[in-house]
Image (cartoon, rainbow, N blue to C red):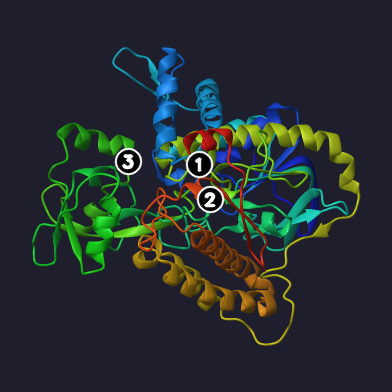
Amino acid sequence: MAVAVSAATVLAADVLVIGGGLAGGWAAVAAARAGASVILVEKGYFGTSGVTATAGPGHWWVPPDPPEARALAIAQRNERGFGLADPDWMARVIDMTWRTLPTLAPYYTFSSNERGEPQYRGLRGPEYLRALRRMAGDLGVRILDHHPALELIADPDGVIVGAAGVRRQAGGDWMARAGAVVLATGGCAFRSRLLGAWNNTGDGLLMAAEGGAELSGMEFSSYYTVAPAGSTMTRSMSYMFGLYFDADGRPLDIRPGPDMTRALAAALMQGPVFCTLERTPEDIRAVMPRVQPNFMLPFDRWGIDPYTERFEVTLRGEGTVRGVGGLRIAGRDCGVGVPGLFAAGDVASREPVAGATSGGGAQNSAWALSTGQWAGEAAARFGRRTTPRLMSGGKPLGRYGLRPRARGRRVDLAGVEAAAREEMLPYDKGLFRSGAGISRSIRRLDQVWCEVADRLEPRQADRLRAREAAAMVATARWCAAAAQARNETRGMHQRLDAPDLDPRLNRRLRLRGVDRILVIPARPHPAQEAAQ
């Protein structure tokens, strides 16, 4: 149920969930089921905001019988993780997904096979989120749409006791005091025009880092998805069947497989690339309107039949949305090492299930569902114990883009945003990395960051945009710092000047700090040590 609050009203609950995507929805449901009072705040509208709302998300759906099926799925995924994944977490995610996804059935009509058996693996994104919204509302969750959070609030002991933000439509500010906070704000796509990701600017990463949380896996941030040029339609399944050509109509050697993106990027760096989907099997063409109903929209608008006519393509960077990196999960309850603060979905590092390679759709959706519920349950336990803290004072933790070190000359927000995009999205900086190139990016981002930290003081109406710009630059700096420290090629992180695996780097890289970034090689997990 949506709740209207007056300007500057202070709200209170056992649990505050920040973010209304797939992970945030499951977190709110789990916390409410555990008996906590819950408030969910969303930058947009819970049900249409985020990458799930534009997609047909599949899930890592592996039945418990026969028992070897799950063991095989975990072994195959672990191999693709290049030594950085964790089979125990994979098993937990598979089991949680299997047990709890069907509980959505009272709110969502799952498709059936020819025998009438429900098919839980794949869902329709908009209907999925609408179902979560209805379920959360029925459980008593207070939903505040268009209420972006700007900063966390901590008590004198450093325990997170709430957050504050702005009301985009009604005007004014909001503050919510809570016994615990779940961050489910998504990743950062650096405003690449990735479908559904305009709001994904790294806000939760910056908020948590200001509170002392660490990050991990940020070097694995170079995932790109093919799309028709001039559109945001990053639905990539059909492009496995594409034939590619240069501007003169000459065929290009771009084949399906793990190297397809790099081959396509290399061709795009030489000039326009065109595609036709004529090899798409008839059964795939028939099912596309159901599994990806928006896929044909740009072609219909342009009057193009992609199965018979050529069209120009591009690549959209996905940053940490379909990359791996995010807040380091410090325990099985999805806490981030800061009392009272938990993380779920894309804002959390997916290294436990993805390692050094993107989890794609299935693992990522299962990760959001599972971590959402673990974080929501843990926040409910923590929040109900500590709710008396709500009456005590709190310190707002946000500084960058809100409270600069100095005053004076205004900072060009458009220039700050452009710097993050220009150092993260070009193919030669994301897909074809080198030590020299990364060092140049770090120098520029550090210069921009000094402007952000020292002088980015927005007018009242610009606070959200200023905070988003600061978060994008902060995220870019973490990505670059981790990429520089991982002087090897592993998974999606590829270095032209270090093309081989380095056994000494068979460990995750933790990052700490906002102004001064420290990169700390983590102690290898036993599963990682065994892989050495």
Q: Is residue 431 above or below residue 285?
A: below
1 vs 3, front mark: 1
Q: Residue at x 61, y 70 (%)?
A: 466
Q: Is residue 182 left or right of residue 369?
A: right
Of residues 91 and 122, the one nearer the viewer is: 91
Q: Is residue 229 left or right of residue 6?
A: left
3 vs 2, front mark: 2
Q: Outermost residue toward the bottom?
A: 409
Mark 3, residue position? 292
Badge 1 or badge 3: first in the primary sequence: 1
What is the distance, in whole Å, between disc 3 and disc 2 at their CAs? Answer: 30 Å
| Crowd around label 1: few <14 · some 14–19 · many ≥20 (10 Å) | many
Of residues 212 and 524, the one nearer the viewer is: 524
| Crowd around label 2: few <14 · some 14–19 · many ≥20 (10 Å) | many
Mark 1, residue position? 84
Q: How many marks?
A: 3
Instruction: State if disc 2 and disc 1 touch (CB < 8 Å).
Output: yes
Residue 308 lies, in percent from the top left, at 10, 49
